């Protein structure tokens, strides 16, 4: 059983039913705010309640990302972060942690690295899954072939404008979980009205059509209250931009990493955590 399947099948007991049932996936950009911080930050976030981590692979043209993650990618690229650096970070994390790790990024760097080589090295260092938003299922069969060959989960996305039949096909092609984009557009925090508009109707469609895989919902969640409202009928939720905004505000103060951990605890357990 893969780490992702295991964590969905063996959710931790908690006094808070929401925290026990809803898994928290935290996105950070590898190499942000500096290469030396990625490994200790992952370990801090795990200790604070994150159930899985998405490591963003910095790219100069991140089409699905808003200004916050674009900024983090630019900073990481200025530090010279490469895919080999990210694989080394994963190897370092694996010396201390078995938390599921997902690489999130874009197809161009993967193609430049060599698709077979990318998936092989990802598996060797301890990556569990891959998300490539600009490589939808059915367009590059080699991706699915490589994932099967190296035992990696391939996680695909659905959005409010995804037709029902397409959702079913994405569910069939995915493993690990299906990434539900709560609103159309790029990553980033939203105000309440925008975040909640049509989400309930969308989730009803998702639950009807996504039946093989767990469902995590993301894009725009910035608080425990948002998560409770949006993720109540899914298996968990994904947060990235809000955490990166906090890091951008607090770094390089002496307690920025602890504040990041506290933010994750509040996302998972609420303000009394």
Image: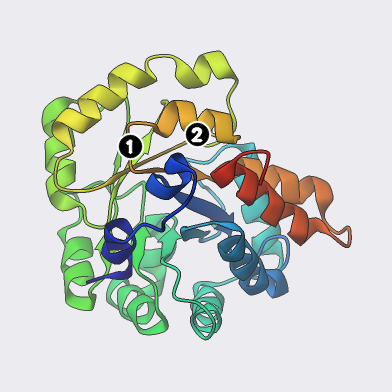
- Residue ID for mark 1: 234
The answer to whether 148 is drawn above or below residue 139 in the figure is below
The answer to whether 14 is drawn above or below residue 32 in the figure is above
Secondary structure of the residue carrying tag 2 is helix
Mark 2 or mark 1: which comes first in sequence?
A: 2
The answer to whether 65 is drawn above or below residue 105 in the figure is above
Question: Which picture quadrant has residue 230?
Answer: top left
Cα distance in 3D space between marks 2 and 1 = 10 Å
Secondary structure of the residue carrying tag 1 is loop
Residue 46 shows up from this direction? yes
- Residue ID for mark 2: 227
Q: Position of residue 273 (x, y in %)?
A: 66, 47
Q: Name the foreground residue: 271 vs 123.
A: 271
Question: Which picture quadrant has residue 169?
Answer: top left
Within 10 Å of the Cα at label 2, are there few (<14), some (14-19), or many (20+) other Cα atoms? many
Identify the residue at image location x=18%, y=38%: 210
Identify the residue at image location x=68%, y=47%: 263
Give the side of residue 61 with respect to residue 124, left or right: right
């Amino acid at each position: 059983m893969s780490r992702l399947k295991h964590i969905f099948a063996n959710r931790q007991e908690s006094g808070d039913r929401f925290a026990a049932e809803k898994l928290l996936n935290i996105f950070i950009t590898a190499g942000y705010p500096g290469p030396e911080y990625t490994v200790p930050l992952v370990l801090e976030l795990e200790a604070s309640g994150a159930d899985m981590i998405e490591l963003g692979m910095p790219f100069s043209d991140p089409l699905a990302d808003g200004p916050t993650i674009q900024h983090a990618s630019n900073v990481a690229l200025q530090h010279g972060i490469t895919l080999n650096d990210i694989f080394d970070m994963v190897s370092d994390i694996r010396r201390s942690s078995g938390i599921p790790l997902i690489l999130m990024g874009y197809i161009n760097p993967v193609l430049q690295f060599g698709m077979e080589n990318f998936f092989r090295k990802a598996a060797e260092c301890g990556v569990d899954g891959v998300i490539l938003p600009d490589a939808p299922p059915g367009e590059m069969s080699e991706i699915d072939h490589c994932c099967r060959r190296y035992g990696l989960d391939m996680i695909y996305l659905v959005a409010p404008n995804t037709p029902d039949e397409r959702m079913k096909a994405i569910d069939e092609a995915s493993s690990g979980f299906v990434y539900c984009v709560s609103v159309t557009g790029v990553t980033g925090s939203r105000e309440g009205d925008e975040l909640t508009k049509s989400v309930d109707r969308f989730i009803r469609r998702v639950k009807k059509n996504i039946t093989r895989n767990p469902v995590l919902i993301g894009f725009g969640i910035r608080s425990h209250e948002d998560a409770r409202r949006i993720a109540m009928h899914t298996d968990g939720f994904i947060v990235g931009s809000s955490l990166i905004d906090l890091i951008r505000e607090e770094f390089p103060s002496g307690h920025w990493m602890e504040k990041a951990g506290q933010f994750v605890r509040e996302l998972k357990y609420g303000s009394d955590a």
